[in-house]
Amino acid sequence: MNKKELEAEKELLSKPGDTIVETLEYYKMSQAELAQRMGKTPSKINDIISGKEPITVTTALQLEKVLGIDAQFWLNRETLYREKLSRIVQEQTLDEYKGWLNFQPLRELKKYGYLKSEKADASMIEECLKFYGVASTNQWQSMYVDQYASTNFRKSSAHSAELASMAAWLRIGEIEMQKLTLPAYDKDAFKQALLEIRKLVKDHPENYASQLQQVCHSVGVGVVFTISIPKAPISGAVRWLRGNPLIQLTDRHKSNDHFWFTFYHESSHILLHGKKDVFIEDFEGVSLDNQKEEEADALANKLIFLEDIVPDFTGKITESEVRRVARKVNTHPAMVIGRLQHLGLVSYSFGNSLKIKVSLSDMFNTPN
């Protein structure tokens, strides 16, 4: 509908007050008498009839006594009217919302089942708002952009698509976290779990992802695997949700060294930093605390026995030497390769045959 048609529909929408007027005409009762019988002022009755004032439970019970029509009828009439009115108003602001919708990663959200609508219309806008669990784009901005993105980044319209993709990715993590039933977070138990998980790092069994989740969930740490959205190429994030820490990971880098180091890096943030801190890795729009990032890197390397591996190499760095050092420090050779590449001691093409390809697509718990 165009704006004129929507305005006409709003004008023609039958208010509960229309039924009050019809009933008054039937009883030959004036609005002034109705006001007196209900104990309200004539202006208040006029506001109820015109739709400016909603029919509350108290008003419905008063109307039942005075006009003899059941209170539930008036409440149902009011609810139906307000719902229809809200939908018309929402369609009237469609142009404003369409601009917001255009920046959302609709293709990915539809592909993975988070959105069903095909056309960018009012129904898709409503579905998208429901996906985020917000009432309007203002709340979306407050919940998913203002508190995460840096000021300059979020104020630039050129980055709207990146911000919307980041927001969608974070929201998917929240949705997956809501499906978990976790015990209270136990810091000491989590520290012990991180030591046990090193066996998963070393062996990298076929079901490494589900085993990782089980161990972490048992100590109150949520671990969810979510899609990597192209315009928000995030490898991982950590934040606290309703009393429990959440580690959200993707398979963006497709190799086990990146996957495990990201996990231990995010875990280190949980151990070292506050519950109000949010850390989003590899997204340029987020302002990082360099000191805290360095602290998390250092602890991650310590936890995986990678902090002092350089002296273990006595001669030329070869794949054979990498395997030897990996056995010595009890980790997977890919972790040693990744560390050496990060330190600039070998090229990024060296030793990649020792890495294992990571794909988490089987772990994405998308909606039906």
Image (cartoon, grey):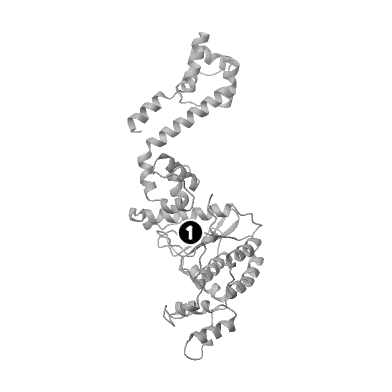
Q: Which residue is mark 1?
A: 227
Q: Quadrant of residue 6?
A: top left
Q: Residue at horizontal 41%, vertical 32%? A: 88
Residue 356, above or below 251: below
Q: Nearer the viewer, residue 258 or 295?
A: 258
Is 280 located above or below residue 32 in the figure? below
Under mark 1, the amino acid is: Ile
- Does 166 sit above or below residue 39? below
Q: Position of residue 338 (x, y in %)?
A: 48, 76
Along the line of sight, the residue nearer the viewer: 217 or 307 = 217
The answer to whether residue 45 of the structure is visible from this angle is yes
Please identify the quadrant where the N terminus is shown: top left
Vertical side of 100 occupied by 330: above or below = below
Instruction: Find the residue positioned furthest to the top.
Output: 28
* Total numbered labels placed on residues in the image: 1
Crowd around label 1: few <14 · some 14–19 · many ≥20 (10 Å) = many
Is residue 29 among the parts visible in the rendering?
A: no
Image position, residue 26 (x, y; %): 51, 10
**How far across and down, in percent of the image, does residue 252 sit?**
46, 65
Q: Nearer the viewer, residue 207 or 302?
A: 207
Give residue 251's position: percent from left, percent from top: 49, 65
Q: In terms of image quadrants, where is residue 195?
A: bottom right
The furthest residue to the bottom: 315
| Closest to the observer, 142 or 15 | 15
Q: Is residue 321 left or right of residue 103?
A: right
Q: Secondary structure at mark 1?
A: loop
